[in-house]
Amino acid sequence: MKSPLGIFYYSNLIAKNLMNKQTIVSLVVILIGVTALVWWSKSVDSKKLGAEGEGLYHLAKTGNNLEANSINFLVASETFYDFGTISMKNGKVSKIFKITNPTSQDIKIPSLVTSCMCTTAYILGEDGTRSRPYGMPGHGGAVPKANAIVRASGSLNIEAVYDPNAHGPAGVGLIERSVLLEDENNNVIEFKFRVNVTP
């Protein structure tokens, strides 16, 4: 017959082994999760045409022989703007970003959305007209389809408008927002801006 201390010793040993197995399984699950997240983020980044601090996007990386490669990409020479410090009392600020289509085919733009309800985007016509406002998906109903076309060898202007009063008194400090334009081939250009809001 085993002593009570012996049973206690073996039960602790079994508990430690189970704990080690649970720890190992947990670490394996975490490792798989991190690997999947890294893989997913790389696939998302590869869809973006531009990022802060670069010159011409994606097109410059793939070469100039567009027709031979059948690549239809829009080009943006600027995708980041810093408004600096602005005051809530002075109201809205805006920035116009230009996209061009260097190919010989028209490119459709079905989607134009913003990252927050404080930001509105407009498509500006060649004659200076402004489209309807495009905003944040899910905020105030569905965002309408842009259904814009950038003609072959043409360009289009996107106006990003930021309202520093949209978040009320809590909306002070450093703010970063985005306008996302997606073409018919699911290529995305993200126009970012930064602003330091004061009362």
Image (cartoon, rainbow, N blue to C red):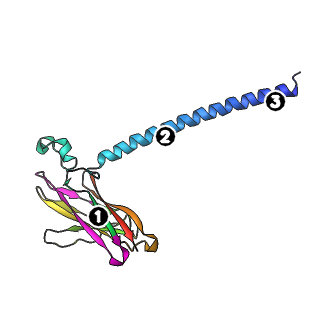
Asked if 34 appears above or below 20 in the picture, the reply is below
Do labels 1 and 2 touch, CB within 8 Å? no
Residue indicated by mark 1: 145
Residue indicated by mark 2: 33
Which disc number belongs to residue 171?
Answer: none
Q: Nearer the viewer, residue 22 or 175?
A: 175
Q: As shown in the figure, which amino acid type bears the numbered disc 3? A: Phe
x, y percentage for residue 120?
31, 68
The residue drawn where x is 30% and y is 47% is: 47
The residue drawn where x is 87% and y is 28% is: 4
In the image as oriented, which residue stretches furthest toward the bottom?
A: 89
Q: Nearer the viewer, residue 168 or 189?
A: 168
Of callouts 1 and 3, the N-terminal one: 3
Q: Secondary structure at mark 3?
A: helix
Q: CA distance from mark 1 to mark 3?
A: 69 Å
Q: CA distance from mark 2 to mark 3?
A: 37 Å
Q: Secondary structure at mark 2?
A: helix
Q: As shown in the figure, which amino acid type bears the numbered disc 2? A: Gly
User: Between tags 1 and 3, which lies in front?
Assistant: 3
The residue drawn where x is 41% and y is 68% is: 139
Residue indicated by mark 3: 8
- Residue range in magenta is 86-110
Q: Secondary structure at mark 1?
A: loop
x, y percentage for residue 133?
29, 71
Q: CA distance from mark 1 to mark 2?
A: 35 Å
